[in-house]
């Protein structure tokens, strides 16, 4: 082996630099053939565990990384190139990364000849098809993978930053009315504007659909001002092609200054703030911190701990069961499973604190399955004493979004040998975030198998009526906020009367939640109400406590 001279090495470097501006998943190599001395891109060296960016006999080293089944073709190609019998190659092979996995790569290389026609350089590019690109093709911004990778670095280096999720409202409508081309141009314009006016290219991300992200060192106040500027700019109308579009935005913000967390938890919390902005705040910037009240300080850490429990075999999660009683006999007819989480550090955490933040998390459906399995297992114990009992289980909209959700439920029921007629799935208004056809399909499929559906917290949102009209519910659960003052407030009595009429029109039963006193019950029992639930009968109980109460012969839960 002849050692390369400084002059040739400089020439190699100069040529390499000229080559090396290519896209993120494509990496350059260049070999000075006289010395068989090469320079390979840093990413290739890191990803595949090569000895160095500069290598003698790089072909032989690389050959070791190529899958044994693809190696012969590669080695013959390289031999022919160095023997002057071939002026390049274009091949696909599997190459072993430093973690032992194989990536599929396409490698194209050509020989460059000197003035005398002798082979001088062999150079080209290797494209790694398995590598997830960090660049969004439409906007040229970093994408979700880039966002997560950067976020991980900020967390591990404990660098405080502010993160904004900002998105275009009604992009779907714009696509439908003006076509996807216009929608795409709008996304490009928006991305460009963010990059030029709020942050640099490096810290602006296209996250998902209409959503963009910004990671910034500016304060929340500064970013809030920037957001209002962008909002005003897009609201007054912008030109896209020949059209003038009036665009509304939504945005959530989160300050990352607690680092005992992970990128997914941060993303879920940010996403929650964004959804709040979209659904309840007409696009005003919603700060994750402001959303939280008394316990705000350690909330991100707590959510991280709760999220981590999902992958630690659901450690800390448990269910309590609250009886539902028949309005006439006051005997238990159903039990609602209510989730809690407990740890030494945080004590018992109620579901309102974590479910809204974690329900869009990719891990949530696994927790949903655990809830179904556990509740059905416990329900079988209650059935030994109350054979007609129905178990009520709350669902999050994100569970139902999965195409295999009906199958998952059926498998769990079949495995447990449970009669689906004794299962009632409760859904809340948040499910209107789902596509209505998808939702109806899930309900119809599972009802055909015998399962029942209840609409929970009826009356608390804008679309209760729409949902009752469009979906077949067996039960409507009237939220406790409508009966809290029923003893003093005649209007609440009238409202309850209307609600029960509506339920009757659509053939659904009525359950009233939040019965706390004898007085409430005595008033409400005169309306067309089928069941009651509330502290007057029983608070949520652990399964053993519930069983004990039932075994004591008190299937009638009237407080003494
Ligand atoms: P929800 O399904 O409407 O459950 C009823 C909530 O009201 C429960 O709160 C229950 O403890 C409370 N409650 C019942 N009776 C009374 C009463 O007389 N007075 C008062 N003040 N409160 C009463 P909890 O257990 O904190 O659950 C809150 C919400 O969290 C639930 O509301 C439900 O939407 C959600 N949730 C609970 N468990 C699960 C679950 O396993 N999965 C899903 N997706 N959501 C759940
Ligand atoms: Mg419920
Ligand atoms: Mg409810």
Image: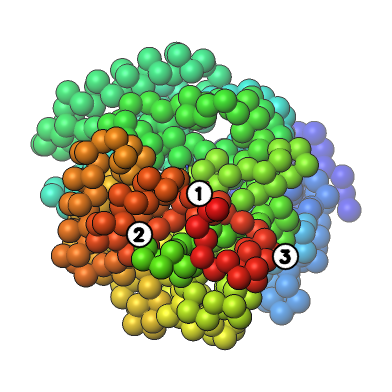
Q: SS of the residue at dot 3?
A: loop
Query: Is disc 1's CB within 8 Å of ligand 1?
Result: yes
Return the mark for residue 471.
none
Q: SS of the residue at dot 1?
A: loop
**CB under 8 Å between callouts 1 and 3?**
no
User: Where is residue 139 drawn, in percent x and y?
Assistant: 37, 41
Q: Which residue is mark 3?
A: 101
Q: How is the image coloured?
A: rainbow
Q: Earlier in the sequence, mark 1 or mark 2?
A: 2
Q: Residues within 10 Å of mark 3 (few under 14, many from 20)?
A: few
Q: Earlier in the sequence, mark 2 or mark 3?
A: 3
Left/right placement of residue 352 relative to residue 226 reads right
Residue 205 lies, with reference to residue 552, above or below; the image says above
Q: Which residue is mark 1?
A: 535
Q: Marks 1/3: CA distance?
A: 56 Å
User: How many numbered marks appear?
Assistant: 3
Return the mark for residue 511.
2
Query: In the image, what residue occupies the spot 52% across and 16% down?
Result: 218
Query: In the image, what residue occupies the spot 45% across and 40% down?
Result: 272
User: Where is residue 339 drawn, in percent x and y?
Assistant: 58, 54
């Amino acid at each position: 082996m002849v050692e390369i001279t400084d002059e040739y090495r400089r020439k190699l470097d100069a040529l390499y630099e000229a080559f090396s501006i290519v896209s993120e998943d494509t990496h350059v190599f260049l070999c000075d053939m006289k010395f068989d001395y090469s320079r390979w891109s840093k990413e290739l060296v890191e990803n595949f565990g090569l000895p160095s960016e500069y290598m003698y006999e790089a072909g032989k080293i690389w050959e070791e990384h190529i899958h044994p089944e693809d190696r012969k073709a590669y080695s013959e190609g390289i031999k022919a190139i160095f023997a002057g019998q071939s002026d390049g190659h274009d091949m696909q092979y599997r190459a072993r990364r430093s973690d032992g996995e194989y990536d599929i790569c396409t490698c194209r290389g050509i020989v460059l000849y000197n003035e005398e026609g002798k082979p001088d350089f062999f150079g080209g590019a290797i494209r790694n098809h398995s590598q997830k690109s960090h660049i969004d093709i439409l906007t040229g911004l970093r994408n979700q993978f880039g966002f997560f990778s950067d976020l991980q670095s900020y967390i591990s280096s404990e660098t405080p930053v502010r993160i904004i999720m900002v998105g275009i409202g009604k992009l779907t409508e714009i696509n439908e009315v003006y076509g996807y081309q216009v929608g795409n141009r709008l996304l490009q314009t928006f991305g460009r504007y963010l990059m030029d006016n709020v942050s640099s290219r490096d810290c602006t991300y296209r996250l998902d659909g209409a959503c963009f992200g910004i990671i910034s060192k500016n304060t929340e106040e500064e970013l809030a001002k920037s957001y209002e500027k962008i909002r005003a700019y897009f609201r007054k109308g912008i030109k896209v092609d020949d059209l003038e579009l009036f665009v509304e935005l939504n945005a959530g913000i989160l300050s990352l200054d607690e680092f005992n967390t992970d990128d997914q938890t941060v993303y879920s919390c940010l996403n929650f703030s964004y959804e709040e902005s979209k659904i309840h705040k007409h696009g005003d910037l919603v700060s994750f911190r402001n959303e939280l009240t008394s316990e705000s300080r350690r909330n991100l850490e707590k959510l991280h701990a709760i999220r981590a429990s999902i992958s630690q075999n659901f450690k800390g999660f448990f269910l309590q069961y609250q009886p539902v009683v028949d309005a006439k006999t006051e005997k238990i007819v159903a039990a609602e499973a209510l989730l809690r989480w407990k740890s030494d550090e945080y004590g018992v955490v109620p579901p309102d604190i974590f479910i809204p933040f974690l329900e869009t998390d990719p891990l949530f459906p696994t927790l949903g399955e655990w809830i179904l399995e556990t509740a059905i297992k416990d329900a079988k114990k209650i059935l030994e004493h109350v054979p007609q009992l129905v178990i009520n289980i709350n669902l999050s909209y994100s569970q139902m979004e999965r195409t295999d959700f009906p199958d998952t439920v059926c498998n769990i029921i079949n495995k447990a040998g449970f009669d689906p007629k004794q299962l009632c799935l409760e859904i809340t208004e948040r499910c209107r975030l789902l596509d209505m056809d998808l939702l109806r399909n899930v309900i119809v499929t599972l009802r055909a198998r015998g399962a029942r559906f209840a609409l929970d917290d009826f009356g608390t949102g804008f679309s209760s009526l729409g949902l009752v009209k469009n979906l077949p519910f067996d039960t409507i659960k009237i939220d406790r906020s409508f009966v809290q003052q029923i003893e003093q407030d005649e209007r609440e009595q009238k409202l309850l009367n209307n609600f029960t009429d509506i339920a009757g029109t659509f053939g659904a039963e009525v359950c009233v939640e939040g019965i706390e006193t004898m007085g409430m019950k005595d008033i409400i029992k005169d309306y067309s109400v089928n069941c009651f639930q509330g502290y007057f009968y029983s608070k949520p109980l652990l399964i053993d406590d519930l069983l004990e109460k039932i075994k004591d012969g008190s299937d009638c839960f009237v407080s003494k």
